[in-house]
Image (spheres, coloured by chain):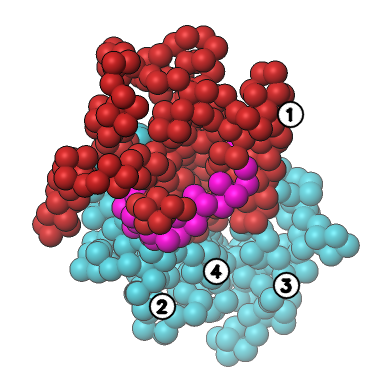
Chain colours: A red, B cyan
Amino acid sequence: MSGRLVLAAALGAAVLAPLVAPTYQALLMLPFMAYAVALLGLNLLFGYTGLVSFGHALFLGIGAYTGAFLTSVFRVRSMEVILVAAAALGALVAAPVGALCVRYVKIYFGMLTLAFGMVFYTFVLKFYRLTGGDEGMPFLRPALLGRSLEGLSKIDYLVGPYYYYSLAVLVLATLVMWRIVRSPFGLCLKTIRDNPTKAETLGIGVARYRWYAFVISAVYAAVGGALLGPPTGNVDPTLAYWTQSGNIVFMTLLGGFASFFGPVLGACRSSRSGG
Amino acid sequence: MILRAEGLRKLYGEVCALDGVSLAIDAGEFVSIIGPNGAGKSTLINVLTGVLRPTAGAVTFKDRDVSGLGPARLARLGIARSFQLVQIFPDLTVLETLQAAVVSRLGRGTRLFASLAADREVQEGAIDVAELFGLGEKRHVPAKQLPQGDKKLLDVASAFALRPELILLDEPTSGVSTADKTTIMESLVSASKRIGVRAIIQVEHDMDIVFAYSDRIIALHEGRVLADGPPAAIEADRRVVDTVVGRRARAG
């Protein structure tokens, strides 16, 4: 019960923040909410399945670049379309990458994911004509729920509609993940984390479940990546660099991967300290 | 015939752990596999349950060739096992451990958005098995906090929660007190009847338990079947007495 009160208070504070907090503080909440979505997914893999990915910046990058491509090349400005496309592309890339990576565990899994992350980083850095290389690509202001909101100043847009949009996505992502970890699927992941040999003899296909967790976590990271784009208005390769993968693992550790909301707290601490 | 193994051979590099082992298990049998350390007992269990792939030979389960199938697929086909060294999920409670087995048996593991707590069939199935093995009162205790005997019992109980047709138990009473040994054996025998397990194979070193519970005993030595027969015949077999059973049989 006290947990629910804390949660309600935190949600209330998040709703009121743009109205009562200084603009700078409200702006800091935007990367927090984007990273929190990504970290909910990363923790399904880390805290619930027992696999530490050092390459999840790959999916942050995919999400962010999907938004940049859609808005600046294909003139698609709907944030809903961007989020769905980012999630779909994240899943599409995660399917073969995950199929290869989940055959390994521990440091071998971590190194493989890191390698795939760096392949993507190199791709966006070197394909200058396509991605803008180290200068990156513009992520034009997306329309929210069909409203273009071009008349607002950038700050008003970010601490107003975009803030609440991001908060709604975070709440939705949290509810979905809450459901997933409390489902039969979530229980199977926990058995794999605790003892894969025993899980296998109970009929739980370990590799298959690890793959599912990998793809779901990639979808979350891609959605988080897409949310990161509008505040800066530009997406560049540093978002896909290995240090970014390290950052999100660090955020998860900072908040505590053993609890559901730990990574969200980690994202909050990290974002507010500028990390 | 529920299980048949023919010409099983398993090599670890130059070392031959199983050398042409053949056996057949009928429905209704409780079969014990005995042998000195290094005879190949655990390797045989691991090959029969898909943990190890045989170098040569075949395993058929209910007339279906299951050689080379992994443990997860064999578990779904109806073969369950427990381990010599206790295998538990340390951070899961007794109930969650049994729920995982029931979820797997019912094929509900991929239900992403279903509520586990609201699934009555899973909840009741898990509680039933917990009660059957005397773990009902400890169902909310994390497995890592259980005493050693209860950990062993949970390992065995989770295999039974799959409602298998055939169960293979690798030293089900190893590492537990004498009092716990009887509890475990009585629990698993009564659970087999209640759940409808068609055959049990156990690897066991405790000859009192082997002779008290087995319908048939298979003695292994240096990777080969030394003898295969009812307890009385095994007790009277001089080769088995000399290599495996030792003084107990001589005294008897």
- Residue at the extreme front of the image, as rendered: A153
Q: Is residue B64 visible?
A: no
Q: Which residue is located at x 32 percent, y 31 percent?
A: A155
Q: Nearer the viewer, mark 2 or mark 4?
A: 2
The x, y position of residue B133, in whole percent, is 30, 65
- Name the residue tied to disc 1: A126
Is A251 magenta? The answer is yes
Query: Dot 4: within a 10 Å radius of its alpha carbon, few (fewer than 14), some, or many (20 or more) residues?
Result: some
Q: Nearer the viewer, mark 1 or mark 2?
A: 1
Q: CA distance from mark 2 to mark 3?
A: 25 Å
- Residue at the extreme right of the image, as rendered: B14
Residue A38 left/right relative to B54: left
- Name the residue tied to disc 4: B84
- Magenta stretch in the rendered image: A240-265
Q: CA distance from mark 4 to mark 3?
A: 14 Å
- Name the residue tied to disc 3: B38
Q: Nearer the viewer, mark 1 or mark 3?
A: 1
Earlier sequence position, callout 4 versus callout 3: 3
Provide the secondary structure element on which disc 4 rests.
loop
Label 2: chain? B
Dot 4 and dot 3 within a common chain? yes
The x, y position of residue B239, in whole percent, is 73, 76
Under mark 3, the amino acid is Gly
Provide the secondary structure element on which disc 3 rests.
loop
Provide the secondary structure element on which disc 2 rests.
helix
Mark 2 and mark 4 in contact? Answer it, CB < 8 Å: no
Return the mark for residue B148. 2
Label 4: chain? B
Residue B2 left/right relative to A44: right
